[in-house]
Image (cartoon, grey):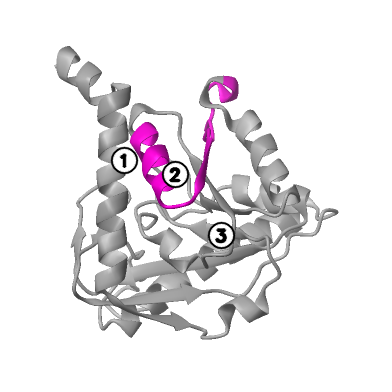
Amino acid sequence: MGLMKRITRSRAVQETLGFLVAGYLKFVQRTNRFVMEPADAYDRVEMPVIAAMWHGQHFMIHFAKRPQDRAASLVSRSGDGEFNAVALRHLGVRAIRGSGARGRDIRKKGGAQAMRAMLRALSDGEMVAMTADVPKISRICGQGIVTLSQLSGRPIVPVAVVTSRRIDFDSWDRASIGLPFGRGAMVLGDPIHIPREADEQTLESLRKTVERELDRVHERAYALIGSRDPGAKPSPVLMGGSRA
């Protein structure tokens, strides 16, 4: 088991895996018929922005990027993150390595260093894409993306990219990856601005806004392809079985 782990995490294997993943995603993008909503989404924002996504729904997020837009994406420092970083490079997206700590050693996880790198990227005109939820806590927006917006002065834009033909995994984040030869939808939410002088109460309110908007754009994207979000939160059920 240890030998297999060393092999799969060798530089040569990671480069090969990343190249193959990128090639597959390009094939999926070319062979699906995508619609974008709203059609004038990019006319409503001033670049650079912070593109927010949910864990598990991030594989195709780069489909929504225009060719002329420079972009960077936050990728964990884990072994699995390495081939993701390679794949992003082949897709024209620069990887920034690091992740949140959730009580663990933030220096080891690279969270503070990654935050500085993302602030530099935004200052230099690069769009930054990052998952809004933290590992193992699916579909609950963390504070990191809100802090990045507050410090950078750049808005958060919730993004969903989905396909009608896909594989849905039974993972903690209910991950989905698209298959070729189907229909796709890309939905961008309205920009969410986080004031630099916002107090704790305001920041918490805006965090919840980001969470609701990410849920909304995913629900809408799946509706456009006649499907249902496999990772959607369960609807509240009142006593007697009636829905809230």
Q: Nearer the viewer, mark 1 or mark 3?
A: 1
* Residue where numbered disc 1 is placed: 18
Q: Are marks 1 and 3 in contact (CB under 8 Å)?
A: no
**Residue 184 or residue 217, whichever sits in front:** 184
**Which image quadrant is residue 229 in?**
bottom left
Residue 174 seen in the figure: no
On screen, 8 above or below 1?
Answer: below
Which portion, as a residue range, is magenta? 81-107
On screen, 159 above or below 70?
Answer: below
**Residue 234 or residue 238, whichever sits in front:** 234
Sequence-wise, which precedes: disc 3 or disc 2?
3
Where residue 61 appears, x then y in whole percent?
Answer: 43, 60
Q: Residue furthest top?
A: 2
Q: Are marks 1 and 2 in contact (CB under 8 Å)?
A: yes
- Using the numbered discs, state the Cα–Cα distance from disc 3 to disc 2 in whole angstroms: 17 Å
* Dot 3 amino acid type: Ala
* Dot 2 amino acid type: Arg
* Dot 1 amino acid type: Gly
Numbered disc 1: secondary structure: helix
Numbered disc 3: secondary structure: strand
Where residue 241 appears, x then y in whole percent?
Answer: 26, 77
On screen, 80 above or below 11?
Answer: below
Is residue 100 within the magenta segment?
yes
Sequence-wise, which precedes: disc 1 or disc 3?
1
Quarter placement of the N terminus: top left
Q: Residue 89, labelled with which disc?
A: 2
Q: Is residue 151 left or right of residue 4?
A: right
Q: Callout 2: few (<14), some (14-19), or many (20+) C-alpha neighbours within 10 Å?
A: some
**Which image quadrant is residue 17 in?**
top left
**Residue 6 or residue 170, whichever sits in front:** 6
* Residue where numbered disc 3 is placed: 51
Quarter placement of the C terminus: bottom left
